[in-house]
Amino acid sequence: MRIEVVTLFPEMIEAVMRHGVTGRAVTRGLLTVSTENPRAHTSDVHQTVDDRPYGGGPGMVMKPEPLYAAIAAAAARLPAGSRRIALTPQGRVLNQALLQELQQLPGLVLVAGRYEGIDERVIESAIDMEISIGDYVLSGGELPALVVIDALARRLPGALGDARSNVEESFNEGLLDWPHYTRPEEFMGRRVPAVLLSGDHAAIARWRREQALERTRERRPDLLKFGGS
Ligand code: ADE
């Protein structure tokens, strides 16, 4: 999968790409991530990327011309069938079902806005979809873009250290995770549940499934109502 991030802060993206599961997906060649800076598409001496909002009000708006040019440059490097996605609080809320859809695509341009937002005409003319990572407002789209990249990277076959992690998670898709334990057997007076020490793999699988169901019922009953993700 190929991802291009359009951002005024490429270092934010590059730093995260060096670590953990995402870093491994990149070094294994499962994922490529590049950036395109709208500032490189300005022609004035101040390299202006924002301007005051028509109609007044606080804050600034990302100017259309450099942003549009940056999106076009990024999209031109991607295969046909790729999508251009803006990270905004107005978008479709990210979940596993949406990640599953994105994973089918050959490439993504992720557009990270700054300031109060981006000129609506860029959304209309150069964006296929808006994605939100939740009902709260961040100060830019870089962290949301990184959330999308991380969640996609760990789903790519071969990205996780242990291939079973993915199989077990997809088996469990739509439910919250079960509790995890490692050594020592007793910590702060609390013992690891005996079934996990029993060596009985069927009993362990049953216990984990029950725990996942029980936690989902208690904490996120909304996830059970529509048959999962
Ligand atoms: N930009 C600012 N807040 C955001 C959010 N919650 N999701 C996606 N992009 C954003």
Image (spheres, rainbow, N blue to C red):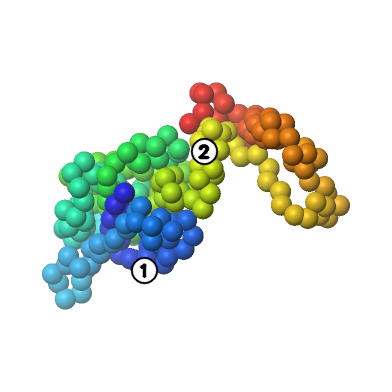
Residue placed most toward the observer, 204 or 150:
204
Earlier residue among tags 2 and 1:
1
Residue placed most toward the observer, 145 or 22:
22
Residue at which label 2 appears: 167
* 37 up-or-down from 178: above or below: below
Residue 59 occupies quadrant: bottom left
Residue at which label 1 appears: 11
Q: Residue at x 27, y 47 (%)?
A: 107
- Give the left or right position of residue 227, taking residue 66 as reference: right
- Give the left or right position of residue 140, taking residue 54 as reference: right
- Give the secondary structure at mark 2: helix
Q: Can see residue 76?
A: yes
Measured as percent of width and height from the top left, residue 171 is found at 54, 33
Of all residues, the one furthest to the bottom in this rendering is 45
What is the three-letter code of the residue carrying label 2?
Val
Measured as percent of width and height from the top left, residue 34 is found at 29, 60
Q: Residue at x 42, y 34 (%)?
A: 97
Measured as percent of width and height from the top left, residue 188 is found at 83, 55
Q: Spatial distance from mark 2 to mark 1, Cα to Cα? A: 33 Å
